[in-house]
Image (spheres, rainbow, N blue to C red):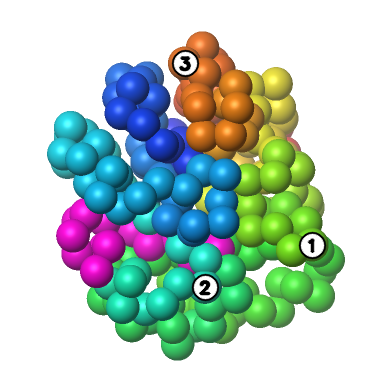
Amino acid sequence: MTIQVKICGLTNLDDTLDAVELGADYLGFNFYPDSKRFIDPIEAKGILQEVPSSIARIGVFVNADSDLVLDVAVDLNLDYLQFHGDESPEYCNVFGRPWMKAHRLKDESDLKQLAAYESSWLMVDAYVEKAFGGTGVVSNWDLARMAKKYGNLFLSGGLKPENIELAINSVWPYAVDVASGVEDTPGQKNRHKMEEFIMKAKAASMKPRLA
């Protein structure tokens, strides 16, 4: 299985087109106003008009009003919704399109909450108190491996070109998610880092498993 790559926190057209050209499978746009990678939905819509429909578009939301989520999802024709806050399973299920819940796992007891979220996809991110992702902190890969039984796993948290091969060999997720690990500054991607990350992720997923 070729592991999928999601480039998240895109904020401008040049970086988005670079991600597409370099082979990203998913593009993530952050609609959480307090994020350093926030993008206005109107601006994101303009960018997505230049993106091939074959590339999956993911909208990232944190404790957002459900009407806002629905409006953005429909207007931007998002393929997936990613909920990165304290959203309940009931909340996640009301939008009528594929979604994943990001879980910031601190210890093994946190795994109990995953079963309540009945989705084909889930994300594991690093636990950082009062932070909703994008911190650059590496997630707990042991917990991530345990989480795989709950759905197709997007591994996030502190991934970068230097550790992506080890992360894949350790966890073997469905997809890997990167934001800060391929940036010069928050929201400004580095083309060389994106190229190296995607290349290494795809190559590692084609090799025999080491773990």
Name the side, left or right, on which 16 lies relative to 197: left
* Residue under pointer 3: 191
Residue drawn at x 18%, y 32% is: 50
Q: CA distance from mark 3 to mark 2?
A: 31 Å
Q: Mark 2 or mark 3, which is nearer the start of the sequence? A: 2
Where residue 81 appears, as percent x and y from the top left, is 38, 62
Residue 28 in view in this figure: yes
Q: Mark 1 or mark 3, which is nearer the start of the sequence? A: 1
Where residue 94 appears, as percent x and y from the top left, is 33, 83
Queried whether the magenta region covers residue 165, the answer comes back as no
Label 1 crowd bin: few (<14), some (14–19), many (20+), radius 10 Å: few
Residue 120 in view in this figure: no
Q: Nearer the viewer, residue 71 or 116?
A: 71
Q: Nearer the viewer, residue 9 or 166?
A: 9
Above or below 42: residue 27: above
- If the image is split into quadrants, where does the N terminus sit? top left
Evaluate if marks 1 and 2 touch, with contact meaning CB atoms under 8 Å apart: no
Q: CA distance from mark 1 to mark 2?
A: 16 Å
Furthest toward the bottom, the residue is 90
| Residue 63: image tag | 2
Q: Secondary structure at mark 1?
A: loop
- Part of the protein shown in magenta: 71-84
User: Which three-letter amino acid code belongs to the residue tagged 2?
Assistant: Asn
User: Which three-letter amino acid code belongs to the residue tagged 1?
Assistant: Glu
- If the image is split into quadrants, where does the C terminus sit? top right
Residue drawn at x 70%, y 21% is: 162
